[in-house]
Each structure stands twice: as structure tokens, then as C-alpha cells.
Image (cartoon, coloured by chain):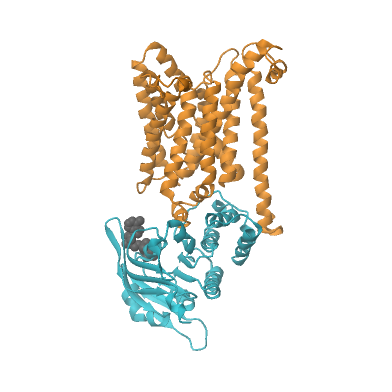
Amino acid sequence: MIEVNAEGLEIRDLSVSRGRTRILDSLPELRARRGELTALLGPNGAGKSTLLQAIAGLLPTDGELSLDGKRLNELSARQRAARIGYLPQLSEAGAMLEVFESLLLARRLAGHHDDDANLAHCEQLVEALTLAPLASQRLGQLSGGQRQRVAIAQALVREPTLLMLDEPTSALDLHFQLSVLEWLSREAREHQRVVIVALHDLSLAARHAAHVWLLHTGRLVACGSPREVLTPARLREVYAIEARVEWPQDGSPPAIIALHAL
Amino acid sequence: MTGTLTSPATAWRHRQRQGARWLWVIGVLVVLACLLDISQGSGQLTLARLLPALWQPQAADPLAHVILWQLRLPIALMAVVVGAALAMAGAQMQTLLHNPLADPFTLGVSAAASVGAGLGLILHFDLIPAGLAPLTFLNAAGLGVTLNAFVFALTASLILWSAQRLPGVGVQTLVLLGIALMFFFNALLGVLQFVASPEALQQLIFWSMGSLERSSWPRLGVLSAVILVCGVIFHRRRSELTALSLGETQARALGVDVRRLRLTGLLCTALLTATAVSFVGSVGFIGLVAPHIARLLVGEQQQRFLPLSALLGALLLSLTSTLSKSLIPDVLLPLGMITALIGLPFFVSLILKRRGLDG
Ligand SMILES: Nc1ncnc2c1ncn2[C@@H]1O[C@H](COP(=O)(O)OP(=O)(O)OP(=O)(O)O)[C@@H](O)[C@H]1O
Ligand SMILES: [Mg+2]
């Protein structure tokens, strides 16, 4: 069990710029553990998407990023992509590609062939995300939420060590918001993956995340358990809202209710 | 539908077989169209008299033999090969630039190739120096002209590639830029025509209209080789190319080196376009129409999409070749004219269908 601490994603002194603008300013030491769901929170423009893109290797970075003690910058694009599954916030609308084929494609790019085992693996994932009825449809013909679920499946289909999802529930109905997050926590736990999810729904984050990173204007404001981080005072400071935060004793889920904007 | 009854994997296998079936169907149609093309032409030679010359020695029917092997067959096969080359180039330009309106013709790459070919012709630019006697037959196939065409086509492709990298350049902006490129290179071609000698002028006009008249076996061989090489390169990168249709971010997140893929791919499309254009001149819209139909039939999965596009391009140009001979009796209409008359309305309808998608 001592080993577990050396595992997961480690960020140290990370800065990210886009062009000449520095978006993220030397984030201190941060760790996302295997087996846990980490929620990445912060208001619009805080830098959540920028951070995820930087970890995915889509933006140049300063500072240190390592996964299971291995520095990510030393890996080739392909090796890095094989360890990381990433769901962008905005995915492309109209590919004329079938859902099932798009999952196989992601596996093929990781060196798998279209053999029975591979097909069975994709089929399992399709069932798990209740995508089976959509499997033969083209991506361009799906609704926003359906496309989002397919994109989640695409991020996961290569069984990455690190799974990063940028607002995976933004287009989902209430049923799938809950079931996707439950399923993600289970994925993290059962397969010892590092799962980082950028979210705007604080109640969902409080309920499912073991760990929270709170960003504001490119800086880390707080990190820790949801209970430590998501206090009314902090929400006032970061989100400019007056909020009621409830942690019921009876085991029912926590609730963070925005009362009014300041 | 199928998804609820059978398992997703079974349904997927079924659709893969369906896609393969389309390849066979269109492949057979190409052969038939090619036969139809051979049967047409001046001189009252029926297919029944021509076809035996395919396997009989010259002596049996010398006239049929000469007409088949020197005239009809090279032209019919050239139509097939050029159609396939242009459709491949169009399909991959659409994939690489992530733009369904892309095609060597609409984006000015063909026009650039024409200018390069014209310059090569006027300046008598030969690829193989006269000293290398055993190889000079390649000059006769027009390879120097082709190389020049390639340099120009590549330049136009690289301009498009750099423009596409600028932030905020959408599908239609790129098409506008391509049309501007086309105007520019057509103006250059006009200048060339103005200063050209009478015999060069004739060839230049022939290029700007598109014609299969100068087909020959060496040229057929060269273009087939180019198709083969590019086909192999595209085939080896098929998964990466398919991933591009998911968008650049997704492709990169899946580990695809998008920049290098685009460069390699555009090099191939420029080569395909330049070779085709330097042999038969400017033939528009095949590279737009064929991939569009292929996409409707089998989607954007490369291992089906690319070969089917190529076969459809071959079919379309083969039919066009037949039309060019038979539409007006005893008059050979320029190929490019017919494809433009059919392709332009198609292009406009594609643009109108995309209304409002570009913000
Ligand atoms: N492509 C870009 N080019 C330049 N600046 C950008 C770009 N994308 C984002 N930014 C800037 O970076 C900052 C952080 O943006 P980011 O997308 O990371 O925020 P976010 O926390 O994901 O916000 P949201 O909740 O709206 O998704 C913002 O100030 C934004 O203006
Ligand atoms: Mg974001």
C-alpha cells in the first residue's frame, strides 16, 4: 500500500501559456491518485480546459508533469496518448463515422487489431454506457448528449491509466449525469485509474469526487476533499455566489445550492 | 433497427461486408463503362470487332488491332486512371483540410499545376538531361512538364495548408481563398498563352479544357505508379486519416501527429493532381463529386472511403469520356467542359447546404 502514494498524476510548478498569454501560473504541487475521482472546479475562464489540454500534451508546458513517476514530456506523442484518455470540452459535430467504428478506430490507433477480443471489448463498453442502440449510427446523426456519451466511451476505450474528461455531463440528462459519474468512480476504483473530471455542477462533484482542485483565474485556490474545499466562504470568493452547502448526516447525498449571484 | 436485434459487433461486421460489396459493384461498373468507352469513336468499328484484338495477334485484324491498342484502349484506361487519381486527391484534400468542399480544382491546385505544366512546356524544361540517353524516353512521356506541374501544385497546397492553420479560418474562408488562388493561376495561364508560340498555344488551350487525346502507354504507366505509391502511403496511414474526421483535437489526443500527416498527405495529393493535370489538363469536380458519393455510401472510414472514391472517380470520368465522344456526333467535346457543366451545380448545392454552418 505504500506504493500507491508514488502512483498517479503528479504536477509540480506547472505553467501553461497560449501564445504570449500565460493562462496557468505556476500551479504548486498537486497529485491525483489512482483509484480516485478528482474533480476540477472553477468558474468560466479559470483554466480548467487549459490544464487538461496541457496534461494531454496538446499545449506546451513549463514545469513538471509525471504519471506513475514517469515524466510525460519524455514520452513520444504516441506513448503519451496510449496512457491518457482525453475528452475535449467541445467535440467535432459531423463526422460520417459509425459509433462502433469510431471506438474500434481509437483502439486501432493504439495498435490493436480488429479481432474478436477487441470487438468484444468495444461491445462491453457500448453496453456499459447504454450505447448499444446507437452503435450503428453515424456520429453526425446523434443528439448532443448521445455524442457526449460516445466521446466518453472513446476516451475510455483504450483503457488509459489517466482519464480526463472536460465537462462530460454538460449535455447529459439527469439520469446520465448520475450514472456516468457513478460509472466513472467505479472505473477509477475497480481498474485503479486516475480520473480527472472538470465540472460545473458542484453537487455532483461533492457527491462523487474524492478530491477537488479549485481553480480561479489561472491559479489554484484550494485542493482537498470536497468538504474542506467547498465552503460557502470559498464559493463566495471564487464563484461570486451566496450558497447553501448541506452535508446530511443520514447518508443522503450532499447538496450545494446557489441562492443568488453577488 | 439492426442495433437492437443483433449485437453491435455483428452489426458492424455486416456493414463492413456491405462496404466491401460496394467496392465490387462500382468496380464492375467501371469495367462496363470502360467497354462502353472503347466502343465509341470515329470509324465504324463495333465492340465485337475490336475486342478480339485484345488477345489476338496483330495479323488477324490489323485495323482493329491498331485502333484498339493505339487509340481506344489508352484513352479509355487514361480516363479511368485520371478519374481515380483526381478522386483520390479530392478525397484526401477533404480529409486533410477537414473541408467537404475541398477538391484540387476548386482550391486552385489544378490551376497551379496547369501553370507549372505550361511553363515547363514553353521553357522546354526536360527532367532527364539529353546526355542520359537510356532514360530520355521519360522526357517523351512528358515527365519534365509533370515535375514542373508538381512544384506549382505543391506550392498551392502549402499556401492552403498554412492558411488552414490560421485561427478562425473556417470551411468557407478556405474555399474562398482557393477560388482566389484559382483566379490567380488562371490569370498566369492567360499570360503564358499570350506570350506562347502558336504550337505551344495549342497545347496550352488543350490543357485548360482537359482532353484525353494525348494518352499514351508510358503516361498510363507513370500515373498508375503514382496512384499505387500514394495509395500505399494512404493505406498505411488509414487509421490516422480516419481519426482526422473526428477533428484535430481528438486526433491529436489519440496520438496522431496531425502536422506531419497533413504535410505527407498534401504532398501526395499535389503529386496525384500534378501528374493527372500534366497528362490530360484541367478536369474539374471529379475530386468533389466522387468522394461525396462515396461518403454517403460507406462513411468516412478510410479503408472503404478512399478506394470507393477512386473507383467512383474512375467511373465518372470514364462515362464523361464516352459522353465527350457521343454527345455531338463526330465532335470531341473537351472533358473539362462536361465535368464543369455537371459538377458546378453540385458544388453550388453543397455550398447552399452548408449555409449557416460557418457562423
Ligand atoms: N484558444 C485559446 N487561445 C487563447 N486564449 C484562450 C484559448 N482558450 C482559452 N483561452 C483563455 O484561457 C483562459 C482559460 O480558459 P479555459 O478554457 O481553460 O477555461 P475553463 O476553466 O475551461 O472555462 P469554461 O468553464 O468556460 O470551460 C481564459 O481566459 C480564456 O480566455
Ligand atoms: Mg473549459
Query: Residue B23 vs residue B347: left or right?
Result: right
Residue at 39% over, 68% down: A66
Give the total of numbered labels: 0
Q: Is residue B205 above or below residue B248?
A: above
Towards the viewer: A229 or A237:
A229
Residue A71 in the image: state x and y as whole percent: 39, 66
**Farthest residue, direction left:** A20
Residue at 47% over, 32% down: B273
Towards the viewer: A210 or B121:
B121
Q: Colour of chain A?
A: cyan
Residue at 33% over, 77% down: A236
Residue at 36% over, 21% down: B190
* Quadrant of ligand 1 in image: bottom left
Query: Residue B188 vs residue A198: left or right?
Result: left
Residue B249 in the image: state x and y as whole percent: 44, 55
Visible residue check, residue A49 = no
Residue B335 in the image: state x and y as whole percent: 53, 23
Quadrant where the N terminus of chain B sits is bottom right
Q: Is residue B312 above or below residue B1?
A: above
Q: Colour of chain B?
A: orange
Q: Is residue B171 above or below residue A66?
A: above
Towards the viewer: B268 or A254:
B268
Residue A117 in the image: state x and y as whole percent: 64, 61
The image quadrant of residue B33 is top right
Visible residue check, residue A146 = yes
